[in-house]
Image (cartoon, helix red, strand yellow):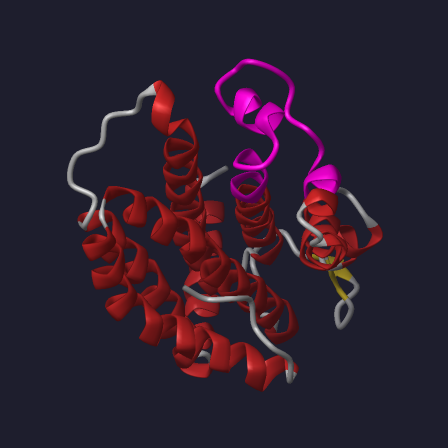
Amino acid sequence: MTEKEAGKFAEAEAEVHNITNSKHQNEIELMTKAFNMYINGFNLIGSFTPTEDNEIEYAWLLCTVQSFNSLRCAIWLISHGYYGQAMALLRTTTEDWFICNDCCKHPPTLDALYGRGEMPSYSAMARRANKRSIYEGDYMTASQFVHSTNLSLRILLDTDTNTLRTAPTYDEVLLMACCELFFRNAIRMTEFLYSFLHHLSEEKAEAWVKVANPCVQECGDWLRNIQGQNPPTAV
């Protein structure tokens, strides 16, 4: 890529970023609040030593940190017009949530996390958790963006000019779809950060609840306003 071409990409990203900030300040601020909510929880942990007796809790921590990093990167991608790539990261947070649910009920899943076997399918995890609706909804929808499908390839085409989009372009529908999955998964994963903190001490867990609940409520209100349906269970 030449310096001139790199400059055009930077200009396109800056333009999308400016449009997003002007039209979706509420969504950007709320995603940032959710990100900071997790930081507040991590700051309460202090020291933790993994042992054979706390493998489940350590798995919760690892998956929560991975989701946290995915959510952070997704904010940047969403605000700069890389919606397909944001969906790919957000799908991993759905996977983390399935794993956290399954590893405390299905020993082979926990074993797989520690390299002692093969990871079961997410479909099987969803079935065991009685969460097929999440698998068939959030997970499969995000998967259409991750893989080369009619949807993921079609959004690369600018129908107004009949040209392929090689640089990011603002799209309100795609942005809102990303935000929806972001908030749903941000709420879901609070369950396991809370459980991990509660394992350390009830005092730490309750201290975090006081910080987290207002943000969780805001995310839930956003989802209700957009979808007119109940959000995931909060801490």
Query: Image quadrant of residue 101?
Result: top right
Q: Residue at x 23, y 57 (%)?
A: 40
Magenta segment: does it hold 158?
no
Residues 162 and 225: in front is 225
Residue under the image location 75 percent in, 73 percent down: 160
| Residue at the extreme top of the image, as rendered | 116
- The reply to whether residue 168 is in sight is yes
From this view, report whether residue 127 is shown above or below residue 175.
Answer: above
Q: Residue at 60% x, 75% y: name it.
A: 172
- Residue 228, position as x, y percentages in the image: 64, 85
Tell me which segment is drawn in magenta. 99-125
Q: Indicate the quadrant containing the C terminus: top left, top right, bottom left or bottom right.
A: bottom left
Q: In the picture shown, does residue 171 fall above or below 51?
A: below
In percent of width and height, residue 170 lies at 56, 69
Q: Nearer the viewer, residue 79 or 183?
A: 183
Q: Position of residue 7 (x, y in %)?
A: 42, 52
Res 76 seen here: no
Q: As drawn, is 184 to the left or to the right of 234?
A: right
Q: Nearer the viewer, residue 210 or 179?
A: 210
Query: Was residue 114 drawn as part of the magenta stretch in this picture?
Result: yes
Against 115, is 107 above or below?
below
Q: Residue 94 at what x, y percent from top left?
A: 58, 49
Position of 142 with respect to 210 (left or right) is: right
